[in-house]
Amino acid sequence: MSERSKPSIFWLFAIFALPIMGVMVKYRFHNPEKMPRSGAVVITPNHYSNIDPVVIGVATWYLGRLPRFMAKASILKVPVLGWILLKSGQIPVERGGSTRSSAALNAAKELVSKERAVIVYPEGSLTRDPDIWPMRGKSGAVRLALELGIPVIPIAHWGTQNLMARYSKKINVFPRHTIDVKVGDPVDLSEFQGKPLDNKTLTAATTKVMDAITALLEDLRGEKAPATRWNPAEHNQSETGRF
């Protein structure tokens, strides 16, 4: 039985979100069988459009899992919306904080006990790469995976930029857009198990995750990514906000 088949508050979202997305988007899945239908997992997508959480949330639903994200703690304090998000298992992260915060870690540990999935964007924000390739990643996803002993499932999507361009707030409803979603094998992080989670270990593990996501995106785009991954710091760019 898939996680999605169990009664939950997510069905309220599905009733409204799926028909709307169905008008605008046709999903084309590649290797959907690689998404575990049960058990705790960290799902790591590429990130290049403000509408990515909706696109990936719906895709995750179709893949048989319930979409839970690392969410800003401030959003979870909004009346009604915050209650709904908390009830649906979103993980709160304080602005400027990390998955090491007590609230985030407690929520993350619940993933394991209840065999849930969580979506973490390892880039942390929309990629700064001028050609929309994945940029340098951050360590939140691998820290969760290594601390809790759960697998990382990389996925890549392409076509979302036609629905909403990077940094844009305008949704291009018509014509209906095809979005390709490719699921990868679990990233092999066994070499890092049992090691101190210092900067060296986390950077190396994050690189493996970003390599896996980039390889999936190369398959979808039919082209090779740049040999060197984009690093905003090397281009005098901030890693958050509009650019």
Image: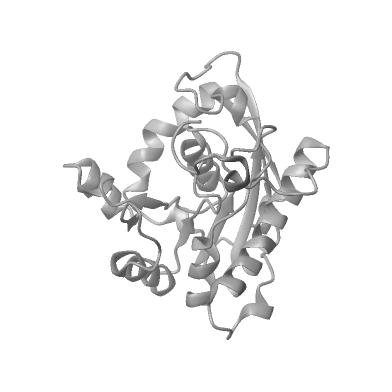
Do we see residue 46 in this rendering? no
Say whether residue 149 is left or right of residue 29.
left
In the image, what residue occupies the spot 45% across and 50% down? 67
Q: Position of residue 79 (x, y in %)?
A: 16, 42
Q: Position of residue 5 (x, y in %)?
A: 45, 54
Along the viewing direction, whichever of 186 and 224 lies nearer the viewer:
224
Q: Give above or below for 211 relative to 176.
A: below
Q: Position of residue 159 (x, y in %)?
A: 65, 30
Residue sitting farthest toward the top? 174
Outermost left residue:
79
Q: Quadrant of residue 98?
A: bottom left
Using the image, determine if residue 89 lies above or below residue 182.
below
User: Does the rendering let one see residue 215?
Assistant: yes
Q: Nearer the viewer, residue 21 or 47?
A: 47
Give me the residue at 46% from left, 33% from top: 18
Residue at 56% from the left image edge and 40% from the top image edge:
236
Q: Dividing the picture into quarters, in which one does residue 240 lie?
A: top left
- Indicate left or right for 162 with 52 as reference: right
Q: Is residue 167 left or right of residue 31?
A: left
Picture layout, residue 81 above or below residue 184? above
